[in-house]
Image (spheres, rainbow, N blue to C red):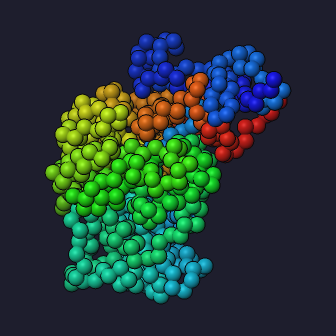
Amino acid sequence: MTHHYTILFGGTVITFDGALATDAGSQAAGDPGVPDAAGRRATALCFAHERILAVGSDEEILALAGPDSMVVDLRGRAVLPGFVEPHAHLYWEGLVAGMRLLAGRERRAALKALPGGAERLDPDAWLVARYDPTGWDRPDDPTRDDLDRTVPDRPVLLAHVSGHAVTANSLALALAGLGRDAADIAGRVAIERDASGEPTGILRGSDAWDRMAAARPPPTAAEGRAALARAAARLAADGVTSVADADVGSTAGVAAEMAAWGDALESGAMPLAVTLLPGLARIAPAPGDPVPSPADLAALLPEDVRVRVRLSHVKLKADGALTTRTAWLRDPYEDAPHAGGPVHEPAALSERIRRAADAGWATATHAIGDAAVAAVLGAYVTVPAPPGTAHRIEHAMLLDDDLVARLAASGVTAVVQPEFLAWAGPTYRARLGEERAGRLLPFSRLLAAGIPTAFSSDRPVVPGAPLAGVRAALRHDPALSAAEALHAWTVAGAAALGDDDAGCLAVGRRSDLVILSGDPTAVPRAAWARGADRIRVEATVAAGHVVHGTLGGDR
């Protein structure tokens, strides 16, 4: 008899089997036997044929080895479930991986670097890049005049890293038909104008990219597949094995992006477990349009990969971003005389969610400002999710006691992004003032209230590594433990996606796992918070296949 098993022994296996969302009980008891956020621990694990076969002690698991087994001594390293990323933009991440990012401290220096991105472009090709003004000495968006001076001879389109603003030069504006008479789209695209009424080149809102990008050539099928392959490699390097693409269709349209997903999955270019959240405004653009069902969207994929893709939620936007002052607040911004506004008025928001539910979809709604969170929770009360699913609220950044209580009563899952706080903390304080900024993302309070809370990154808004998210969360919230943060990146993320095979190392589960350099729960939280934890991803295994690094130490 042969045993084509892979056996990992001699380390710390943090299974999250039987784990709680919070360590409150174990911390209060001071007893290591009380269930905590890390769950059952072991020292060895065996998997084969994409499934976990056994978890236990070294003696128990080594006894399963046969002549054809791969036996790996972990040498004290840690094995965890592969990280789950429930809210990312993979197609976009893959496309922007090679784009220039205008960032740094000096606005002028960032803009001077822009022409370097045009060196290998065809003469009439668009120059597309991203910009992040949050750290600039003068953090205002570039205008058409800035871009005309920098690159006068080709269309230029810059995307704000948040995804909620773009800026373009005169050639790009002309090709997009954005002149003096161009109209805003209420709640979705606001065209900034100068004193004479001419567009400044800056567009803000959830559909700002769409409005400009429609004028440029769409990515080819080959470019789409390559983008997803790049994104998969980046995610695997960060230890991610299960991922959701939120707002499918936002970059190149639903049909093109679904085709790219089908191609990438069928070819093996995308080896991770995949959930797709089509943009509701992409599949049903007008409020009264019929909403295609999950089966209708699945039919856009090759038949042999449909079973590998989860389709249960649509993505909807209730507001914008704090960095671009498009998040919808109850009170005006600290540094602007307005409070943002809704993408959809509350009645229209509820109607869109109802139509989606009637078609078989739960909804994952982007809501950052407190007014937006309140509107979304109000809509969810009137429109339950389809059986077997739960509505989600994405970001849920600005919360007070009342909103935390309403969120707890709703049963809605909060999908939040701790790395945002490390990226744009000073900008948030400038936008909100110290008091309101102090109410951003109270992680431990969400857990204490019993709110299902999953961590994510919204990558490529931020680089997105889950370990960076753990560091940011522990820096922000002194009451949070490392185990709780890791639980939010594993068990809670899998629950948000409805992926019963992910987030836990237990017999029969999919063999998705990450090998870390050491036990992350043994590192003092203060070391995590100051970035001195020294924990790194050494290998990633998705469905039994090594997709990053090497297992090492064969015996």
The correct choice, above or below, for 187 with respect to 316 in the image is: below
Residue plotted at (30% across, 47% down): 359
The correct choice, above or below, for 508 with respect to 471 in the image is: above
Q: Is residue 460 visible?
A: no
Residue plotted at (50% across, 28% down): 483
Q: Which residue is at the front of the view, 177 or 285?
A: 285
Find residue 320 and report its horizontal and vertical position in percent. Answer: 30, 57
The correct choice, above or below, for 134 with respect to 363 in the image is: below
Q: If the image is split into quadrants, where does the N terminus sit? A: top right
* 303 lies left or right of 496: right
Q: Which residue is at the front of the view, 434 or 405?
A: 405
Residue 479 found in image quarter:
top left
Q: Which residue is at the front of the view, 312 or 135?
A: 312
Find residue 191 and report its horizontal and vertical position in percent. Answer: 27, 73
Residue 250 found in image quarter:
bottom left
Q: Is residue 205 visible?
A: yes
Find residue 215 and report its horizontal and vertical position in percent. Answer: 40, 77
Residue plotted at (57% across, 45% down): 272
